[in-house]
Image: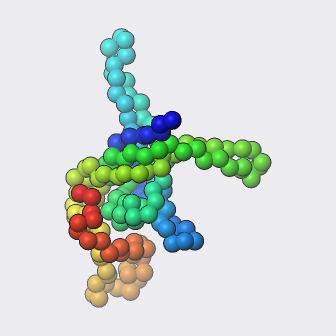
């Protein structure tokens, strides 16, 4: 049998990362993909599909560091079925794509409205010494910095 999925679209949320007991990174996010076509009457139609993505290992860490909601990506992987029992006892299931390859497609500024490039994600901005203490407390939680050689970055 053959199980291969290829999708290109925009991330619907930032990558959420966690680590297994063995220390392996597990990332989850979603992608929005669309399809455009003309109906028999000539009317333009569009269908948007939202798909959950699961990433593992180095791919999850790189995606967490460099991608944000709205980033355009090309992924390929395999379709998986997650099944569980809800608190009310009902059986639930959903399909997701387990990402095997990830390519960043959009320009470096697409998902970053401030206009800075991806290389800025490798070193989060530190509050300056002149900022008031209450301003520094309101800074968002910092993303952990991952030591990456430039040769490892897939773009």
Residue positioned 38% across, 54% down in the render:
69
Given residues 112 and 29, the one toward you in this image is 29
Residue positioned 75% across, 44% down in the render:
90
Residue positioned 42% across, 61% down in the render:
60
Single out the residue that lies furthest toward the right: 89
Single out the residue that lies furthest toward the top: 41
- Residue 104 horizontal/vertical position (percent): 29, 53
Depicted 33 relative to depicted 82: above or below: above
- Residue 115 horizontal/vertical position (percent): 22, 61
Q: How many marks overall?
A: 0
Given residues 16 and 70, the one toward you in this image is 16
Using residue 128 as the reference point, say whether residue 90 is left or right of it: right
Single out the residue that lies furthest toward the front: 1
Using residue 155 as the reference point, say whether residue 62 is left or right of it: right
- Residue 63 horizontal/vertical position (percent): 37, 60
Quadrant of residue 150 in the image?
A: bottom left
Depicted 31 relative to depicted 46: above or below: below
- Residue 105 horizontal/vertical position (percent): 26, 49
Q: Is residue 12 visible?
A: no
Residue positioned 34% across, 42% down in the render:
8
Depicted 74 relative to depicted 117: above or below: above
């Amino acid at each position: 049998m053959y199980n291969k999925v290829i999708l290109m679209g925009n991330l619907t949320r930032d990558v959420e990362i966690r680590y297994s007991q063995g220390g392996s990174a597990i990332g989850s996010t979603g992608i929005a993909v669309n399809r455009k076509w003309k109906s028999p009457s000539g009317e333009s139609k569009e269908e948007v599909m939202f798909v959950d993505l699961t990433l593992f290992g180095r791919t999850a860490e790189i995606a967490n560091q460099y991608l944000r909601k709205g980033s355009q990506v090309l992924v390929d992987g395999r379709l998986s079925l997650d099944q569980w029992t809800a608190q009310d006892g009902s059986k639930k299931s959903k399909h997701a794509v387990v990402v095997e390859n990830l390519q960043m497609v959009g320009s470096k500024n697409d998902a970053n409205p401030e206009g800075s490039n991806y290389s800025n994600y490798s070193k989060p901005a530190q509050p300056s010494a002149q900022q008031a203490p209450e301003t520094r407390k309101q800074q968002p939680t910092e993303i952990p910095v991952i030591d990456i050689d430039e040769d490892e970055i897939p773009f």
